[in-house]
Amino acid sequence: MDEMHVDFAVPDDVPVPPDTVPSLDDASVPEQLQDLVIDSDDVAGFLHDLAVFSAASVSEAVGLDVLCGITLSRRRRTATVAGSTHEARLIDEVQQAYGDGPCLEAMRSHATVHVPDTSTEERWSEYCTVIAERGHLSALCVPLELDEGATAALNFFAPKAHVYDEATIRNCELYASQAERSLRLAVRIGIKQQHADDLQAAMQSRTVIDLACGIIMGQNRCSQDEAFRILTKASNGRNQKLRDVAEQLVKAVADEAPVAHFEP
């Protein structure tokens, strides 16, 4: 949880149309969250849409313009920060820079963290002072229980202190339990897509290497094993990746350019 670098999820601020904003306990919330997954191209896009949707829902519940930031941490991946606005993303990025704060604590403890008044908060005084000076006087951070080695939190920031009462906190937690199902699905889809992309890249790499070996076999009238050894030797000699050397050879042949003769 001490990652200092973050990826931003979708830079543009896109408001949610009023007729798509349900209350936190609306029966249509699960279906609308599922639609966000279906309509998103990737995990980053879903996080952005979820942040915008969540901010609109909580804003309606409390009667104020609430910002929503989302931090997603996955194994061996840079933390991804999304927000309903640029300001919401900035707030979470600042917290990542400090390395601690209510959001990160919620993710570590798997428990909701409520900061009634950021201007007097002592647990994360430096961070809370910064966001209080930016006009965010209360914060509510609700963890999302995921799998696949991932953790996340919904972070709501309001312009007044003591905005979140017990009923609102409870409704936000219920909402988060629905949102985490959709995020869990989005993460799983993202992982499978990454695996598919990696496999496709490996297959393409294998194809170009096989083509290069075929060219070398024709040049030297040698076996495939010998051609592969020659290609590997060239790769090591040039201090280039095997696939890059193979691509150069295949491209040279395809472009009918003079081709360097690969010899044992």
Image (tube, rainbow, N blue to C red):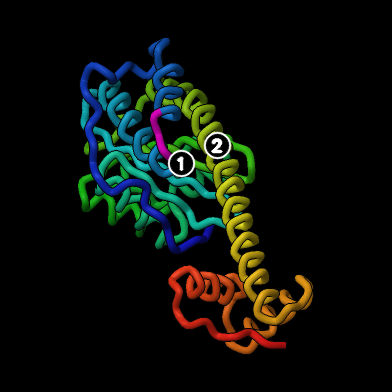
> What mark, if any, has residue 189 been given in the picture?
2
- The local crowd at label 1, few if under 14, some if 14 to 19, many if 20 or more residues have their Cα within 10 Å, is many
**Mark 1 vs 2, N-terminal side:** 1
The foreground one among 237 and 135 is 237
Q: What residue would you read off at disc 1?
A: 43
Where disc 1 sits, the SS reads: helix
Q: Residue at the spot x=51%, y=30% of the render?
A: 180
Q: Residue at the spot x=54%, y=27% of the render?
A: 181
Instruction: Please indicate whether residue 137 sits to the left or right of residue 231 in the image.
Output: left
Magenta highlight range: 39-43
Q: Judge whether 196 appears above or below 97 on screen.
A: above
| Quadrant of the drawing holding the N terminus | bottom right
Q: Percent position (x, y) of residue 203?
A: 63, 55
Evaluate whether residue 114 shows in this view. no
In the image, farthest residue toward the top:
27
Q: Percent position (x, y) of residue 89?
A: 32, 49
Instruction: Inspect the magenta stretch and tell me whether residue 41 lies in it.
Output: yes
Q: Percent position (x, y) of residue 67?
A: 28, 38
**Distance between mark 1 and mark 2 Cα atoms:** 8 Å
Q: Percent position (x, y) of residue 249?
A: 54, 75
The foreground one among 246 and 218 is 218
